[in-house]
Image: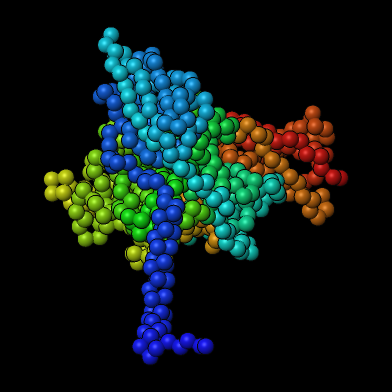
Amino acid sequence: MVVRPSRASRRRLRRRARLAPAALVFVLAVAALHAVAAAASSAPTAPACAPAALDASAQLDGAVTVSPMPGSADSSPNTQISFLGVPAGALGDVTVAGSSSGAHAGRLEAYSTGDGASFVPARPFDAGELVTVRAQLTRGGVVAPLRYSFRVAEVDPLSQTPAQRRPLLPGSTQSFISRPDLRPPSVSVGAHSPAQAPGEVLLAPYGVPAQAGPMILDGEGRLVWFDPLSPPLAAANLQVQQLDGAPVLTWWQGLITIHGFGVGVDVIDDTHYRTIAEVRAGDGDQADLHDFQITPQGTALITAYQAVHCDLAAVGGGTDGAVTDSLMQEIDIRTGLVMFEWTSLDHVALSASYSQAAGSTASRPFDFFHLNSINVDPDGTLLVSSRNTWAAYDIDPATGQILWTLGGRHSTYSESRGAATAYQHDVRPDGPGAYTVFDNGASPQVHAQSRGVVLEVDTQTGTVSVREQFLHPGLPLLADSQGSLQALPGGDWFVGWGQEPYLSEFSASGALLFDAHLPRGYESYRALSSPWSATPTSAPALAVRPGPGARATAYASWNGATGVVRWELLEGDSPRSLARIGSVARSGFETAIPLELDRYLAVRAIGSGGVVLGTSAVVALPR
């Protein structure tokens, strides 16, 4: 017998069948929400990279400036612990312990300047751990304890992919018969006046598949010195400085990456182009191209960059993001120790940036600050420029705290018409209350063109205004990056147009005195004008090319020599019996000298007053 449900039972079954799909959808939706919540809860979240107290003091007991800063959250696993401001002998019983790595052995090394020491750990710290530092400070017979802590960052390796190079156009390089190994960029001079300031022009061209390196021109734009580097290395920031009371030539060299930073070393040469020191960044970092300033105390202020794992959700980025931290380090040139370190993340809010955190990744970190110049002000404070916050910051060197801000979202001073800069470079003091700036106005474009500008700060009214500005008179140059404005001693102004390969000198009244450019595709981070006198240790170069009949042409040059006024010819039947046969005035980097063929030939470089500066090797001539 088949049992059939009653009519009422069938109605109940049909009603349940109609409800079943809706119930199933509800159940699936709830499950999906639980899955999303579970996924969100398990998604990786980076640590906070900013300290709990922004712009806190780095000074302990009113006497010792420490690095890393107390409470810092962006310290390198390879950091030293720096104690600056007291003799090394005043420090004792230094102990350092990580919350996960435990006690760290190390050595306390004194600075050559006599005002502090660094504790150099024997092994790195663990990422993310809290490091506690204890020491005893003895002053005037009184012993005081020092204690502070900082957190170690999770460091992301910055990509060292070289920056993309632009095509090399035909005719873009110079060539020399006496120095066929040198192929510097050609220089086109559009304006040259006898009224321009005395001195040489210093630059470091790169950007194309050709030789890159530091380069010096004379006042007429002719080559004086070029030092080609092995590719893919480049140079930047060539300048004349003082070390121990003597003039030196300094520059950065290394790899310029796709991020616009450099990874390399700062070089110091004497007046014979002999390298007397190389300054390297400390704490496991590499020196960056943006600045290298030798202080009156014989220390070096340099820039460096470090990418840090960071939660960027608060500024529109990802929770598992990365940010590029800008570092200023003071390095003891003689010992290589880090005496002081200032980091952007410790002192400036991420929200101050005009760059965007959205879309940043570990390989393309959020470049919120981008430090591009350092200066020691006459009052001893430190002035740094941040491209991506559009601001310059004056810093107390004892505490590391920001004293005032010029420009950007949180300027101490209100900006009068035309005084606002954007993505600027090379901020320097120029007398009381005045500051020189290379105002890029791009990238992206904010202003119609780039300019050199002198800003005047009125502390009484709290305003900043434009005192004077310099625009390129021939072209509306817009430099997306780099650039410099230099006040010259006689009142003139020298502008390096950065990514736009132009160099210009203006008089105090704004008249164009000198203007030159490199071929399209080249760029130079800065271009400066400075007196420079040098005699290379190498001998002058000589090459001879036979001409028709008994005629020939000798080509003489001396890479880097600044004092040669004429070339003296020596000829003879043997290398040991050369006699002077005449002289010609020096005419640029390489001087062509017509002559009659003889057996042997050499040239002597003659300076002012007839002083013999150097003699070439002897060349055997064909007969």
317, 580: nearer the viewer: 317
Residue located 32% across and 16% down the image: 137
Q: Residue furthest top?
A: 141
Image position of 458 (left or right of 621): left
394, 607: nearer the viewer: 394
Check the image and report above or below for 476 versus 537: below
Q: Quadrant of residue 586?
A: top right
Whether residue 156 is visible: yes
Q: Residue furthest left?
A: 460
Whether residue 281 is visible: no
Protein image colouring: rainbow
Q: Residue furthest right?
A: 623
46, 230: nearer the viewer: 46
> Residue 82 at x, y = what percent?
40, 27
Q: Residue furthest front?
A: 1
Residue located 38% across and 79% down the image: 22
Residue located 40% across and 40% down the image: 74
Q: Quadrant of residue 409?
A: bottom left
Check the image and report above or below for 432 versus 2: above
Residue located 20% across and 50% down the image: 413
Image position of 287 (left or right of 382): right
> Residue 21 at x, y = what percent?
42, 80
Query: Which quarter shows the C terminus?
Result: top right
Check the image and report above or below for 528 versus 441: above
> Residue 507 at x, y = what percent?
35, 52
Q: How many marks?
A: 0
> Residue 147 at x, y = what percent?
32, 24
